[in-house]
Image (cartoon, grey):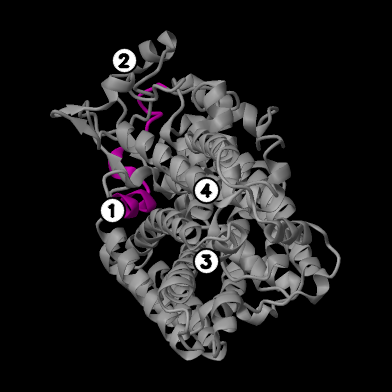
């Protein structure tokens, strides 16, 4: 069976499974639509949470980022995993005990203010819509390569699939669909990694293969990779960092607290029967997430070595990396390169007209490497590889069987669709439950609220699709920006709502607004969106990354600090918290009676 037919079968079967589950698990009440009736078991919720959390960024992009950045890419592993631990330990159990459906509802009740709830909705929508752009883009990338359609068509198909199981199933349908999606994506991620680890090191466990010996040599795989990339003029893989130490720290911290503040992940803990189950499901989710996250570094390193080995035959065969015959002829490049060239995510330009692909570092500071490259007729790097293709192309680079490539296609789509569904659920709940029922129409019937939620979900899908088709100019950093927004606006408010009995509504609202605005200002100023008298605003604040060299993707941690400071200052000079609110906060933090809590509102 040819590759394309195999892909159609695998993707078609997975989509049929998702739609079938949606039909079986249709939501019949607001409790089922928003919180799956509060009846999901810990293990199943842990699996669904893992699928909700491991987005296209985790499945498609993370290993590619690590592959490109080397050691510095580890900040994504530390930030996202550490953030989930923060969420599981500091937020999830307490929010579950509060017994509400959504984050804005918690903030509105805790800070005894509909205005606070409205601000939280604005922050949630800003973060969720920004995040979903990346998911829809991931759907487009996967479809354009594997189904032979344009990325626009891929987004339309993705919208239709999500509509089928999210609008009708609500959180109940999404939950069971995400369990299936987790199974698909984890097999799709780990099976190719096992095959490739066996090929390169003889060890079937990728996590151990990363530190094992490289086949046919007396050095480890990482030592071999370091030797290859430095000889080709690239930075040493195991020591390269993401900018300054301060920026790397702030980037990691921003991802951590942004993770803990993401509303679509928090909502998953409202679906279990009790606080005990919330803690248990958090532990299970961490185990399920760790399977992929501990595999990602091995996938990144092995894919990078295989890529160099494909373009430069001397990498695996030994010999001079700069010898004319070491670089493969363009006409001999493998079929997988030709397939990915059609997507525009892999590009080859024969700059010196020798008919070969010379993949050396344009920005090398290694004079020896540069001299050897120029002696071989090099006139600049001739191969451009987008980080997003590393995982999806990995089994093709390693010449694995067609069914493995098809499985990866299904896994990539499962990762993007599962997170998109979770984000859309958060958006729908914020609009229908927090805005319509909470503020504009508090007397709306349950049936009316359920219909409003479905309409809000449908509109959100259309908006998400439109943004995927017409991404804004700053779309390249949308995932990191979404984490920054959640970190600077929602996380501090939730933390203070749980752990500070003295934080009042004025402080919380001022903090959320300040944190959100300063983060958006820094990001948009960096992207050249703010102009003053026709001049880019950045020179007026000191240039790009002007705040101690911190990049926009890392600025969420600064925004969070501003949020905390503004909140406590404003709280000091405004009216104190009512006594009944202080008592409520104390009750939420004490575990007594937690088993009796339900998802009722």
Q: CA distance from mark 1 to mark 4?
A: 35 Å
Residue 456 at x, y percent in the picture: 38, 75
Of residues 173 and 88, the one nearer the viewer is 88
Mark 4 and mark 1 in contact (Cβ < 8 Å)?
Answer: no
- The residue carrying mark 4 is 506
Of labels 1 and 4, the one closer to you: 4
Mark 2 surroundings within 10 Å by alpha-carbon count, few (fewer than 14), some (14 through 19), many (20 or more):
few
Answer with left or right where residue 51 lies relative to residue 121: right
Query: Marks 1/3: CA distance?
Result: 28 Å
Q: Which range of residues does the magenta coloring cover?
A: 322-342
Q: Label 2: state its secondary structure.
A: helix
Q: Tag 1, which secondary structure?
A: loop
Kindly identify which residue carries mark 3.
407
Is residue 144 left or right of 114 when viewed as pictured? left
Position of residue 65 measured from the top left corner of the image (x, y, whole percent): 49, 40
Residue ID for mark 2: 374
How far apart, in angstroms, are the residues tagged by discs 4 and 3?
A: 51 Å
Of callouts 1 and 4, the N-terminal one: 1
Residue linked to disc 1: 471
What's the CA distance linking mark 2 and mark 3? 42 Å
């Amino acid at each position: 069976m040819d590759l394309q037919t195999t892909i159609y079968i695998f993707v078609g079967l997975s989509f049929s499974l998702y739609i079938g589950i949606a039909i079986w698990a249709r939501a019949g009440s607001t409790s089922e639509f928003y919180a799956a009736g509060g009846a999901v078991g810990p293990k199943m919720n842990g699996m669904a949470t893992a699928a909700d959390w491991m987005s296209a960024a985790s499945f498609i992009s993370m290993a590619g980022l690590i592959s490109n950045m080397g050691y510095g890419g580890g900040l994504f592993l530390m930030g996202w995993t550490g953030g989930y631990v923060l969420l599981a330990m500091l937020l999830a159990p307490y929010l579950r005990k509060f017994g509400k459906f959504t984050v804005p509802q918690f903030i509105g009740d805790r800070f005894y203010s509909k205005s606070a709830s409205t601000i939280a909705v604005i922050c949630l929508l800003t973060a969720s819509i920004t995040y979903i752009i990346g998911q829809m883009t991931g759907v487009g990338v996967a479809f354009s390569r594997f189904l032979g359609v344009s990325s626009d068509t891929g987004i339309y198909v993705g919208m239709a699939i999500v509509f089928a199981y999210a609008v009708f199933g609500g959180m109940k349908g999404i939950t069971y669909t995400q369990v299936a999606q987790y199974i698909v994506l984890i097999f799709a991620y780990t099976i190719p990694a096992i095959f490739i680890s066996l090929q390169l090191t003889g060890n079937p466990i990728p996590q151990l293969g990363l530190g094992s010996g490289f086949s046919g040599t007396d050095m480890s795989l990482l030592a071999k990779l370091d030797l290859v990339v430095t000889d080709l003029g690239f930075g040493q893989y195991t020591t390269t960092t993401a900018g300054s130490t301060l920026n790397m720290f702030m980037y990691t911290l921003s991802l951590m607290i942004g993770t803990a503040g993401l509303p679509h992940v928090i909502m998953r803990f409202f679906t279990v029967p009790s606080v005990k189950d919330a803690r248990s499901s958090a532990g299970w989710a961490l185990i399920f997430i760790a399977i992929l996250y501990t595999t990602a570094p091995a996938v990144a390193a092995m894919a990078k070595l295989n890529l160099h080995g494909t373009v430069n035959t001397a990498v695996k065969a030994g010999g001079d990396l700069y010898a004319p015959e070491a670089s493969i002829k363009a006409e001999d490049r493998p079929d997988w390169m030709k397939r990915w060239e059609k997507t525009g995510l892999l590009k080859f330009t024969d700059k010196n007209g020798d008919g070969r692909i010379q993949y050396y570092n344009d920005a090398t500071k290694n004079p020896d490497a540069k001299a050897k490259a120029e002696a071989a007729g090099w006139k600049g790097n001739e191969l451009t590889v987008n980080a997003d293709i590393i995982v999806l192309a990995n089994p093709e680079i390693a010449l694995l069987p067609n069914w493995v490539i098809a499985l990866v296609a299904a896994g990539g789509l499962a990762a993007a669709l599962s997170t998109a569904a979770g984000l859309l659920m958060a958006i729908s709940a914020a609009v229908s439950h927090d805005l319509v029922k909470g503020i504009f129409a508090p007397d709306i019937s349950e049936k009316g609220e359920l219909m409003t939620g479905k309409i809000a979900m449908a509109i959100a899908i259309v908006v998400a699709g439109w943004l995927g088709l017409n991404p804004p100019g700053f779309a390249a950093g949308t995932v990191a920006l979404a984490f920054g927004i959640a970190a600077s606006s929602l996380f501090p408010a939730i933390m203070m709502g749980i752990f500070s009995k003295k934080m009042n509504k004025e402080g919380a609202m001022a903090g959320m607004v300040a944190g959100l605005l300063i983060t958006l200002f820094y990001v948009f100023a960096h992207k050249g969106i703010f102009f003053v008298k026709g001049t880019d605003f950045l020179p007026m604040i000191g240039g790009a990354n002007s705040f101690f060299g911190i990049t926009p993707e890392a600025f969420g941690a600064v925004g969070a600090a501003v949020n905390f400071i503004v909140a406590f200052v404003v709280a000091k000079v405004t009216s104190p918290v009512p006594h009944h609110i202080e008592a409520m906060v104390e009750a939420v933090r004490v575990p007594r009676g937690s088993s009796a809590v339900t998802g009722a509102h």
